Image (tube, grey):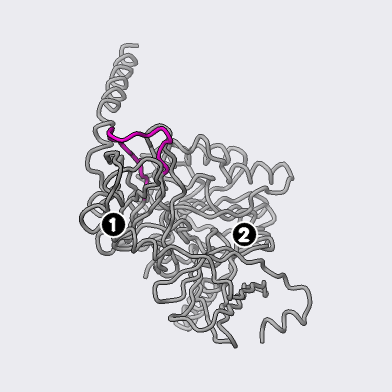
Amino acid sequence: MKKLWCGLVVASLLIGAISAYAQKVGEPAPEFQATDSNGQTHRLSEYRGKFVVLEWHNNGCPYTRKHYESGNMQRLQKEWIARGVIWFTVISSAPGQQGYVTAQQENDYLKQMNGSPTAALLDPQGDVGRLYSAKTTPHMFIINPAGVLIYDGAIDSKATTDQADIATATNYVSQALGEAMAGKPVTTPTSRPYGCSVKYAH
Amino acid sequence: MFDRSVICLIRFFFVGAAWLVLPTLASAESPADQHVKVELISEQDAIVPHREIWLGIRFDLQDGWHTYWVNPGDSGEPPRIEWQLPEGFQAGAILWPYPERLSTPPFMDFGYEHQVLLIAAVQPSAALKEGVSQSFAARVHYLVCRDVCIPGQKQLELTLPVKRESRAVAGSDDQLFEVTRRRLPKPAPASWKIMAASVSDDFVLNLIIGKVAGVPQFFPLEEEQLENAAPQTATRIPGGYRLHLKKSSHLLKPLSRLKGVLVVGGGKAYALDVPVSQPSTDAHRQSMKN
């Protein structure tokens, strides 16, 4: 019975993963469940009523490093969490691949970098990543209080590894959150996520 | 108070040291250098007044590594070239040879392995006279990837004499320019008829192009229009082929034109820019499906 149940769970995850249109802006964001680096389990549906940001992360990727070593990502996390946003950093690197971390390594990293997401979700099987078709690190998603996906794309408008570009780029995440909180339509609901490919298990 | 000033001093020292060291680092070996050699080359051995000259940035990539086309696909970034030319000289646009599909499931990137030359025509200054050498420079920003990605930056330089006549440079570089030109997308032949239609989750391209050497493959020039990793199914239809291209889930509005490069085998590629007809009637949909 246990085996059958497991099989069903795996099968349902696979179905979620291979459906090309699992996530689309304007439609309900797919439900997921994941464990964070402190062992706590989170379900997306628990956060209905709040804005939720998903940030795909790989600490070895030069594009991720651009936004962490400059302090840009940490600033965004602080700013938006202070305004009631739930911010999940999601790590979908498979064991042995760049960016894979244990819970302890992730907690050490967050401490060292002054990272302060609501939680860092560990997704070494890539289930949440595939469910959202997360392509790059970083790749950003925003879900509104009604559970609808309102942004899917890049962190900002300058697809480079150069920290100097952050100041002159349009930050699509801040723009979308600001507009949505003000009850306005999101100017840029999708963009090409730029960065390293997510290092899924092969 | 004392502590603060010590911290201040230490900070000052480190920041100051970084400034001193950085310019040296910029020209020294960078981690990307182990995987790619980047050079500025010329097709001709001299500049001739009033005659354009072709320059190129050549990337020689280690096996297993790649760099990117102008639309890099699902990840990565195309090389960026900032020319620093003598006064009065003007560089044309970078011309991109057609790329390869680089698959790392579930992703698809578009780029180059082994070797690629990115070329541009440079117009000399009208005031240019024979006798004085001219120095060209280019700052190139690029990304090379295998399973991991490494960004690189290079300041490249080249000095050429100004002469009444020029010849092809010695070695294989001049041939490389010719090989590269053959890989540049050409205008579609006038006899071709190409139609694009939006049909539910796909764009359907009807290519009335006769028979070609290989299975036609389409590379979108603009990002976020197609699901890059989706297989492009080509079927034979009278007079040519039909290609099904899966729309990107990021495409929220109807697309008015589809721009890209059609690679047809035998090393040939053509630039396409076709209007996309939108599904208006069932009859239309039916005709595109048959």
Pick the residue in front: A113 or B171.
B171
- Marker count (numbered): 2
Crowd rating for badge 2 (residues with CA inside 10 Å; few <14, some 14–19, many 20+): some
Task: Determine if marks 2 and 1 fall on one subunit.
Answer: no
> Is residue B140 highlighted in magenta?
yes
Q: Which residues are magenta?
A: B123-142
- Badge 2 element: helix
Residue, disc 2: A45
Q: CA distance from mark 2 to mark 1?
A: 62 Å
- Badge 1 element: helix
Q: Amino acid at mark 1?
A: Asp
Relative image position of residue A149 (x, y in whole percent): 63, 57
Residue ID at (44%, 61%)? A123
Task: Provide the chain ID for the residue under circle 1.
Answer: B
Residue ID at (44%, 80%)? B214
> Is residue B179 highlighted in magenta?
no
Q: Which quarter of the image is occupied by the C terminus of chain A?
A: bottom left
- Image-based side of B107 in relation to B178, left or right: right
Residue ID at (68%, 43%)? A179
Q: Amino acid at mark 2?
A: Ser
Q: Which quadrant of the view contains residue B28?
A: top left
Relative image position of residue B212 (x, y in whole percent): 47, 81
Question: Do the numbered discs 2 and 1 sit on residues whose CB atoms are within 8 Å?
Answer: no
Task: Provide the chain ID for the residue under circle 2.
Answer: A
- Image-based side of A157 in relation to B50, left or right: right
Answer whether residue A30 is visible to the viewer in this image.
no
Residue, disc 1: B174
Q: Which mark is residue B279?
A: none
